[in-house]
Amino acid sequence: MISTYKPGIRLTLGLAAAALATGCASGGKPAATLAPGLLEAANPQVLLLGEVHDNAQGHKLRYELLRQRVEAGWRPSLVMEQFDRENQDLLNKAQKGCLDAQCVIRVAGGARWDWQLYYPVIQLALTYQLPLVAGNLSRADASRVVRDGVASSFDPQGVKDYKLDQPLPTALISAQQREIVTGHCDMLPEMMVGGMVNAQVARDIWMARIIRDQLPRDVVLIAGNGHVRKDIGVGYWLHEAAPALKVRSVGFIEGGDNGGRYDSIQTVAPQTRDDPCKQVRK
């Protein structure tokens, strides 16, 4: 059993997740059980499962959805945003040597995530020998993207697959800009927006690419709601590169807003939290 601890490095979440979560918290009825149809639907080739990062109920419901499917015989790979892709070797080592999820977290987990929320999913992967795959953009690549653009973190094949030798779609960029500016309390300096949009898009494309690398094995992505969106997130880029791939996205939303962003939504009770914009407004 591995006992050493070498933390991974992850990108800062910033205010975006909490602010957007708060903005979605009105409307809809939060559910304590899984929405009808989520369990009955057939397993797709790729299942994108979102989250509000700090919402404990959402984590529990998502785990329940995944647990029931796995216990019924499904054996997908689990791609997780919470692990940086540059730390895949550490994650592989942990999966081979660890007896429980806490050990995996100790060996391969980075700072700034509330890892106890992810403990059940990681333990499920260990129990059923589901491959854990690091899905997040590395810190070095993120810095390069902010400076040099989305294509800078990809090899020629990646540039070709995702048409990164062409300008990114205007509608996608506009939507990402709105999300990032809103998520930073409408107080983000304009000069920073473009680089942050590029970093977000690069994360989505990398997750899409890593998912495709797992095929023909089925894949589950564990990531924030923004990443699992089918209109501008990972779902969009999977369709661009592999339109025949059967992909289903599920948003775990504080409130009931979908707006075509997901194939299905699971409403969850809003998490009690301080106003994420309070410090910025001081």
Image (cartoon, grey):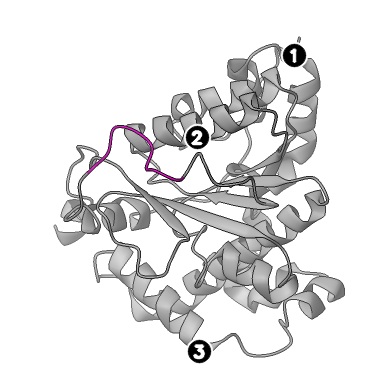
Q: 188 left or right of 25?
A: right
Label 3 and label 2: CA atoms lie apart by: 35 Å
Label 1 and label 2: CA atoms lie apart by: 30 Å
The correct choice, above or below, for 51 with respect to 280 in the image is above
User: Which disc is residue 2 wearing?
Assistant: 1
Q: Which residue type carries mark 3?
A: Thr
Ranked by sequence position, the earlier of labels 1 and 2 is 1
Q: Which residue type carries mark 2?
A: Leu
- Residue at 68% x, 18% y is 127
Look at mark 2 in the image and give the residue it sits on.
65
Query: Within the image, what quadrant is residue 273 found in?
Result: top left
Give the mark toward the camera: 3 or 1.
3
Q: Which residue type carries mark 1?
A: Ile
Q: Residues within 10 Å of mark 2 (few under 14, many from 20)?
A: some
From which residue to which does the magenta span run?
30-37
SS under mark 3: helix
Quadrant of image for the N terminus: top right
SS under mark 2: helix
- Residue at 47% x, 49% y is 50
Look at mark 3 in the image and give the residue it sits on.
170
- Residue at 50% x, 80% y is 172
Q: Could you tell me how many numbered marks the image carries?
A: 3
Quadrant of image for the C terminus: bottom left
Q: 159 left or right of 239?
A: right
Label 3 and label 1: CA atoms lie apart by: 48 Å
Q: Is residue 105 visible?
A: no
Q: Position of residue 185 (x, y in %)?
A: 24, 65
Q: Give the dominant element type of the magenta stretch: helix, strand or loop.
A: loop
Ranked by sequence position, the earlier of labels 3 and 1 is 1
Q: Is residue 31 found inside the magenta-colored segment of the image?
A: yes
The residue lying toward the viewer, choosing from 251 and 208, is: 251
